[in-house]
Amino acid sequence: MPPLPLPASVPISWYLTLSAILFSLGVLGFILRRNIITVFMSIELMLNAVNLTFITFSYMLKRVDGHIFSFFVMVVAAAEAAVGLAIILTVFKNRQTLEIDEVSSLKN
Amino acid sequence: MDAILFLVFAAIAVICGINMVVQKHPIASALSLVGVMAALAALYLLLGGEFIAAAQLVVYSGAIMVLFVFVIMLLNAGAEKKAVLRPWGKYFGAPLLLVFFGIMFFVVQRLTPASAGVVFGGFQGAGAREIGQSLFTVYLLPFEVTSILILVAILGAIVLARKEID
């Protein structure tokens, strides 16, 4: 078996494809899972995939702006995690459940 | 060498991502997510972003995931029941996701120049010095707005999670 022909430099498209795969996995977790915490973690996975895209394009364009954007995404994700987990705590305190289907008092 | 490193860390990221989606217990999902984030930090290093790689490790797989694990243990969350997939999700969600991924793959293959490749050390312009310079000159206003956002988030978290005292 001949060795795999590995390129000397990694093509940009590999990084972007990896980002698309991770984003799709995040969406899949978001629509499949029923635990409210896991759904929240899927959102974090999607944010990470977008960060990878930012950094990759930053490399491609040889500019620093992508890094700044992904830095801001991190800050917003931290704020979102703090508030979201506080909301989850409150929901659990009032309902004693983490199933996302049982928290449906806004329906109808 | 670069390609081998990329493939190793990409494989770690994808495997941990799949594991996160299929695991039933939230703790297993959280630890898989830590794996994804650590692998992504290594990929940021390969792309020349030392500062972002360190921030990824400290902020994401450090602070945010500790918060998640803390809440999971605080709520004593058990394994979730068998996921009931509605017909909408089964017959539209998954195929649409495949279509989305296919389109993304196609666009990525067509858009990016085939000649440009990523080599380690090929981009030196994103160290802490350059990021700091850019952050405090061009992006000063968004940076200050960010501080207000953090303040609002802290207040919101305290108000939401406080214990009612009569």
Image: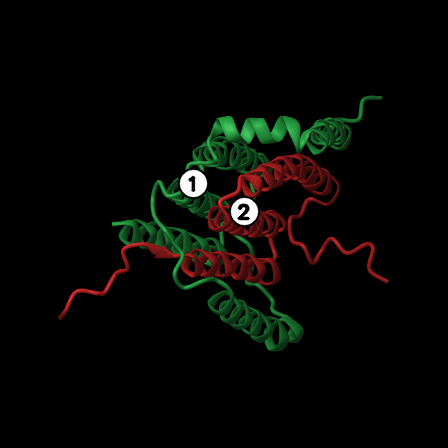
Q: Specify the label residue B41 is tagged with.
A: 1
Residue B21 appears at what percent x and percent y? 49, 57
Q: SS for tag 2?
A: helix
Chain identifier of the green chain: B
Q: SS for tag 1?
A: helix
Q: Nearer the viewer, residue B115 or B147?
A: B115
Tell me the residue at 47%/59% (across/down): B22
Local packing at callout 1 (Cα closer than 10 Å; few below 14, some 14-19, many 20+) is many
Location of the N terminus of chain A (image quadrant): bottom left
Say left or right for B28 vs B166.
Answer: left
Q: Nearer the viewer, residue B51 or A18?
A: B51
Location of the C terminus of chain A (image quadrant): bottom right
Tell me the residue at 41%/64% (across/down): B114
Question: What chain is tagged by disc 2?
Answer: A
Residue B42 appears at what percent x and percent y? 38, 42
Q: Colour of chain A?
A: red
Task: Report which residue position mark 2 lands on.
Answer: A51
Residue A44 appears at what percent x and percent y? 57, 47
Q: Residue furthest bottom?
A: B91
What separation in Å lies between label 1 and label 2 (alpha carbons)? 11 Å
* Mark 1 residue type: Ala
Say left or right for A107 vs A47.
Answer: right
Tell me the residue at 82%/60% (across/down): A107
Question: What chain is tagged by disc 1?
Answer: B
Q: Nearer the viewer, residue B150 or B118?
A: B118
* Way the structure is coloured: by chain
Residue A8 appears at what percent x and percent y? 27, 55
Q: Residue furthest left?
A: A1
| Rendered image quadrant of residue A87 | top right
